Amino acid sequence: MWFVSHWVHHHLEEFQSIAASKATTMGHIQRGHLKTAMTICPSGELMEKMDPLMAPLVEQSIQNELESRSLAKLRDALLPKLISGELRVKDAERFIEERSP
């Protein structure tokens, strides 16, 4: 899965351009577009050797992205309240505890 994920990411801008030219979502990506998106595939043996190395890195990358989004939401919720004075820094800790799962 990590290889496919990286392949899609590598070609994502091209796919987005195709979709944008149709003024629609990614639904207009056709099988032909996928066929022309070339890649060099390593051998099955090499993929098997790389999997134990790559899978944890990809999983960590996903977890980092999720945490980044969570922190951004928290920042977006707290910052306006701090700037307006509605929330004081020492009250922010309680606010964070209330919003954390």
Image: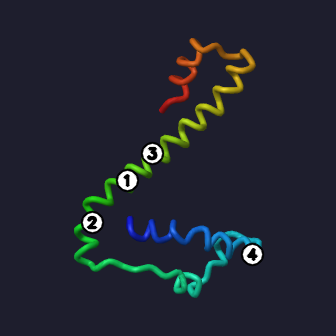
Dot placed on the residue nearer the N-terminal end, 1 or 2? 2
Position above or below: 78 against 66? above
Residue kind at label 2, given as amino acid type: Met
Identify residue for label 2: 50
Identify residue for label 4: 21
- Position of 50 with respect to 69 (left or right) is left
Dot placed on the residue nearer the N-terminal end, 2 or 3? 2
Quadrant location of residue 94? top right
Label 3, label 1: how far apart the Cα atoms are: 9 Å
Dot placed on the residue nearer the N-terminal end, 3 or 4? 4
Measured from the top left, where is residue 29 in percent x and y?
62, 78
Helix, strand, or loop for circle 1? Answer: helix
Residue at image location 71% in from the left, 16% down from the top: 86
Residue kind at label 3, given as amino acid type: Asn
Q: Are marks 3 and 4 in contact (CB under 8 Å)?
A: no
What is the crowding at mark 3: few (fewer than 14 residues within 10 Å), some, or many (at least 20)? few
Residue kind at label 4, given as amino acid type: Ser
Label 2, label 3: how far apart the Cα atoms are: 21 Å
Identify residue for label 3: 64
What is the crowding at mark 1: few (fewer than 14 residues within 10 Å), some, or many (at least 20)? few
Helix, strand, or loop for circle 2? Answer: helix
Identify residue for label 1: 59
Q: Are marks 1 and 2 in contact (CB under 8 Å)?
A: no
Label 3, label 4: how far apart the Cα atoms are: 32 Å
